[in-house]
Image (spheres, grey):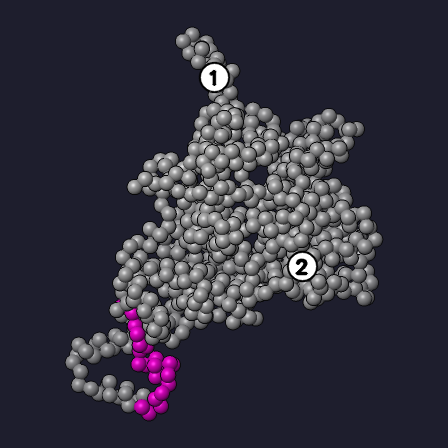
Amino acid sequence: MRTAIFFTAIFIYTQAAFCQTIDFTNYQGLYSSGIVPDDFTKLSSQKYKDERENINTSESRRDQLSQDQFYLESNFLTDRLLHSGRVVFGDPVTNYLNEIKAIILKDDPKLKEKIRIYTYRSNDANAYTFNNGIVLVTTGLLMQAENEAQIAFILCHEFKHYVEQHAISSYVESERMDRGDGVYRNLNSQDVELAQLRYSKDLEIEADEKGLELYKKTNYNAEAVSSAFDVLLYSYLPFDEVEFNKTYFNHGTFQIPDDYILDSLKEISAQEDYDDSESTHPNIKSRKEDALEILGNIDNTNRKDFLVSEETFRYVQNICRYEAVKLYLTDLNYEYAFYSNYLLMLDDPENPYLQKNMAKALYSISRYKTDRSYSTDMHVSYQKIEGNAQQIYYMAEKLPAKDFSILALQSVWKAYKNNPQDKTLEIMTDELMYDVLKKHNIKIKDLKTEYPITVVDSVAVKKEDTAEKEEVKEEKTTSKSSKYKKIKESKEEEETTTSKTGDNAYWKYAFVELLKDEIFSKKFTEAEKDRTVDLEDSYEKYDKKKDEYALGINKIVVVDPLYMKVDETSKTAVKYVASEQGQLDMRKKIDDCADELNMKVDFVSSKEIDSKDVEAFNDLAILNDWLSEKLEHEDQEVEILNSTQEEMKTLAKKYEVDNFVWIGILSIKEKEENIGLKIVGLLIPYTMPFVVYDLIEPNNYSYFFTLVANGNTGNMEMQYFNGTNLKDRDSVQKSNIYYILHQMKNKNRK
């Protein structure tokens, strides 16, 4: 409970001049621009030192310690979030939000200066306020909102969280509850948790009330307050509810069988008056009623939904919706990526970027299904999805892996044919062809090259008139066929091309048109004949001897070297200040070891970014997104092309390097366990010396880990982990760092 309070702080479920011009046909993503703010360049330890000056010395010693701990933890964990790659500044979305802030706080320039708004790339519809004045607004909130006034109300709510210092007061009060101070003395653990939830609700009610008073001073539409709560209530759904065209994938006689399509969808179940007894927020119904009471009979004349401009709002919202698809792909939520992309394509069906996203989503689902990793571990069951998106989840879950690979190949080929220079689409095409032909054991000779006559006549070409078709039909029925031939013909007529099995199985007609395409046919035939080597061999395997890699690398880019010091014997287990200093010191240790090995090392580190390093800040965001997605695939043991591989390849070219390296050290001092047994051991003469030594010599462990990724191929070339029961002295750190770099530098002796 306490961790949730300080980490997320207080949150709510919740054409102007811009620095960037977005080309939606070649969308690159939402990135930072301009001068890097101090919030991103100042060391966490310095922020902590500065905020300690705010500790109220008139309060009890215990409360002062709680405040100190809050400032320590909140600054370090907030900075981890700011440097995660998901927070952006100077972008069109952030600029727009700051314009709204300027309107709300036009009469309070001091507060306007203290509050700094940034955009948080997340599909959750939320806003987060931190004790230091930082407000993060998610792209998901802007994606879902109906108008600017709704955003303005939510910002008013967040601003009051900061003014009233709710984050720190919530933390300190929670500590009092945990300790059993004062009125909390006789509470059990369950009562404490309920008290914490009640206190959190009280703060939310206060933020609503005082936020509404601030909102009333603006010229924003009063009716937007009530509708803003509706936005929050239904924010778990995609940004629009449009029926998915069930014939979307159908062409000619390739028609998805009805068994793979839902007749009815799960109704949207969200209710305003839900049970909020275990929630940090009051339910929507009570909040809405309270808000309407505060607004009273306010004069809504001349109040508007848009004060910056509707054009700017629509532009920014579109950015957030495009970003949503990108995030869904990175986070492996391929079904929502597909459906959200489908919604965008309704307005722009020929957009090549959207076509490529569709291909990526289908390719990714196909690869997971083919590798038998499409399970509840990585995707949500269709039974838990509400609304029109459920249709996509159902098809993805129910279509056999073979069928889905065929379906995906059709879509990817279409995108590739429209852009034959796109190497990503080419790789996806090759892998899907391999899956269809090798993993699913489909032979080209088994595929149909022509549609059935009945379909050609009535659907495809319609060259013959009705009389001619009747003549053909009469010929078939009056011909002197044998009994057995008539039986077979009868069965063929009964077997439609929506059959899942048999000679007329629907998937056999998937490539009728494509096999007439000379380029596709040639590539498909070559794949069947020549690809005798398992495609998985193209991905790096870890079949080398333990700890022996010999990669032969002379130049690397080290990404945000990590150092963390943990003391489990202390009340504050994570030693934040020491961890930050250790991270800063790692730069020199890596440099020294690299010099000894004659290796060239560059760094992309959040600890070294200054006000002019916005480019490096964006590079770090790309690298973090890429690694996060890659590790998810590795965890599921699926060999698949990352959705952000193109960006990674661009960075490899920029830094003139193949390999990016993540290297880290975890130093742990463990607390004593099984004390009772050790006391018994002290009473036994022959075990006493060993027990005494164990008690006076704490258990220290140092863990070293390294990941090496090839930016051009997307392969993980090295995954190294080593632990030792030694303190992480400089000599221990350097020897391990040297060994790690030596494994990269050393060439394989054949």
| Position of residue 585 in the picture relative to residue 465 (left or right) | right
Give residue 670's position: percent from left, percent from top: 51, 25
In the rendered image, which residue does mark 2 sit on? 19
Determine contact: label 1, label 2, CB under 8 Å: no
Image coords of residue 216 (percent x, y): 80, 56
Q: Amino acid at mark 2?
A: Cys
Q: Nearer the viewer, residue 670 or 586?
A: 586
Residue matched to label 1 = 694
708 shown above or below 107 = above
In the picture shown, does residue 23 fall above or below 295?
below
Quarter that holds the N terminus: top right
Q: Residues within 10 Å of mark 2 (few under 14, many from 20)?
A: few
On-image quarter of the C terminus: top left
| Residue 571 in sight | yes
| Residue plotted at (73% across, 50% down) | 157
Residue 617: give x, y in percent of width and height: 60, 48
Residue 455 in magenta?
yes
Q: Answer whether residue 311 is magenta in the image.
A: no
Residue at the limit of the structure toward the bottom, as seen here? 467
Q: Secondary structure at mark 2?
A: loop
Res. 202 visible in picture: no
Dot 1 or dot 2: first in sequence order is 2
Residue 433 x/y as whole percent: 34, 62
Furthest-top residue in this view? 685
Residue 248 falls in which quadrant of the image?
Answer: bottom left
At label 1, counting other C-alpha atoms closer than 10 Å, the crowd grade (few under 14, some 14-19, many 20 or more) is: few
Q: Nearer the viewer, mark 1 or mark 2?
A: 2
Q: Which residues are magenta?
A: 446-468
In the image, taking residue 583 as reference, residue 468 lies left or right, namely left
